[in-house]
Amino acid sequence: MPIPNPEELKTRLEAALPGVRVEVFPNPAVPAQSSLLIAPAEAVAVAKFLQDEPQLRLDMCSNVTGVDWPDREEKVKVKQLVDGVEKEVEEVRRHPGCLEAVYHLYSVALKQGPVILRQRTANRTDDTAVASLTPVWRGCEFQEREAYDLFGIRFTGHPDLRRILMWDEFKDHPMRKDYVEPDDYEYEPTPHDEVLDRAKAHYPAPEVKA
Amino acid sequence: MSDARNQLYQIRPKVAPDGAELEGELLEVSMGPQHPSTHGVFRMDVVLDGETVVKLKPVFGYLHRNHEKIGEGTSYLSSMPYTDRLDYFSSLTNNWAYALAVEKLSGLVVPERAEYIRVITAELTRLQNHTSLCGFLLQDMGALGTPLMWAFREREKVLDLFESLTGARMMCNYMRFGGCRCDLPPGWLEQARKLVDEYPRFLGEFEALLSGNEILMARSQGVGRLSPELAVSAGVTGPMLRASGVDYDLRKVDRYGIYERFEFRVPLGDHGDVFDRYMIRVLEMHETLKILRQALQQIPEGPVVDPKAKLRGFRPKVGESYGRLEGPKGEIGFYLISDGSANPYRYRVRPPSFINLTILEDMCLGRSVADAVIILGSVDIVLGEVDR
């Protein structure tokens, strides 16, 4: 029995778990790999359902990763009444950004998949929490740590949320789109060209006394 | 941590023969990153009670170069040579997995001959990867020299084939979206057939000397057991998963490429211990040779790349794709998000050896340090892929 398509899955999820809202995130390039957007508060319940449902039995979480969607501005032309005359006015619409955690689930028992889950954070700055699915699938443990390390997504309920690839003292999250690497990121014994210019800003050359 | 792993962190009370309680102390040892048994710059923070491992935390990142960020900064094609550097033992399967994800995204069709070449090169990759792993594993167990030298002698022959086909022994950079970079050079197929015909002799020799070896069995049987439930839940894939008795081989499950045309079996383990993991790899080599024999016999003439594929100005449609295949170490996958531009918006590698390390601690707890070394050896990691 093949895996149901995302629309069908959404209906089944919403029927089985009252109060859960699922949104289908369409994928124009590979329609079979469309994903389900779920709310962090309901993520663990949805995950447990997908794992236990006898027709799905998604027992393996193959891939966990983050995606960064920065804030973006869109210029739209809107018709507006200005002094009684209809005019085209340019308006800037702000789309707030978010961080996304993406999970690719497969069923080893029934040899089918994938079902793709997405969770979104509220914003990219102070509220970057989503629910950890490590209690459901152990395979998320290191991969969620990696998403935390590189994207700054905080997984609530993760047993051991620490940096994994970068060192513990590292401050930023390098996979974010707006990450700027520090000027003195790599030590150069004899800085030259751009590196020299940037190095000067940090280490002013000692004055040479005549 | 809420699970049972935590309970072991306490010192077991030691009792002297006369009944007096002895004081004990835990010892924290940092194994690596320059330890010869860690297969690269990998560190394990091990807490020991006597010689028994009570806690083990792997530490990664010494080789981290943010492969994914580099991939987002360059065009789709420019990432192809970078994929060689992930798991540098099996660059051709990395190439294929990446090409598979991009082909899914862009709808390119791979010509028949290119599919055969892909299967042949991927299976040769698996052959040399498993051969060298068996050598390394025995080296870890203390069989210094002979097995590894033998394995590398055979691996050289496969690498010679890669060199004559792709120009490089390890960093092959051979697959392209919609096919392969170039056709086989004249006489290559004969050489490959010769290698496939001669390989069983080496395998027989290797097995006669080692598989029934008493020391190998004593060191590896019952060591590092992994239950099938935990293996599946932890996302363990490849020979590791099959050694635990779970029948899951992407060549059979996903039937990517043209694998449904070949007759081969999927060997499964019984106990999920180090010995099973060793044995699975030996048995898989025999199955790989079966696939190779069939593919080398059936390979047709024809073009090796989709005429619609273009090298310059390649811009796939907006969308995302996840392509995965059965690499020698497990499921290697690529997750791509395209925003319609020349660079991928998101480029993610699903590294099998990184995820297979999730359960390293579970397998090592309660075993000795010497066992931890061979358990790590049986996972088959490559740090280029773990750290990315």
Image: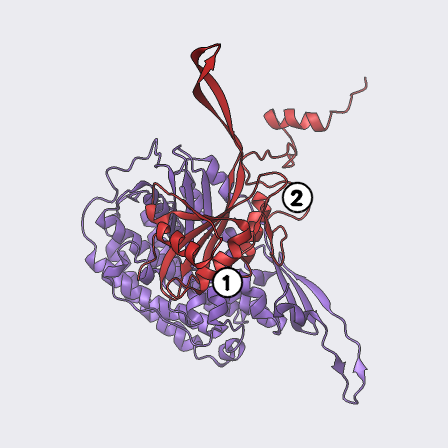
Which amino acid type is shown beneath numbered disc 1?
Ala
Q: Residues within 10 Å of mark 2 (few under 14, many from 20)?
A: few
Name the residue tied to disc 2: A170
Q: Colour of chain B?
A: purple
Q: Nearer the viewer, residue B358 or B294?
A: B358
Name the residue tied to disc 1: B234
Query: Mark on residue B52?
Result: none
Which amino acid type is shown beneath numbered disc 2?
Phe
Corner quadrant of residue B309: top left
Q: Are marks 1 and 2 in contact (CB under 8 Å)?
A: no
> Disc 1 is attached to a residue of which chain?
B
Corner quadrant of residue B46: bottom right
Q: Nearer the viewer, residue A57 or B296?
A: A57
Query: How far apart, in angstroms, are the residues tagged by discs 1 and 2?
Result: 28 Å
Chain shaded red: A
**Which element carries disc 2, helix, strand or loop?**
loop
Seen at 26% across and 42% down, the residue is B305
Seen at 77% across and 85% down, the residue is B16
Seen at 46% across and 61% down, the residue is A49
Q: What x and y, as percent, mark residue B311? A: 32, 35
Residue B376 appears in the rendering: yes
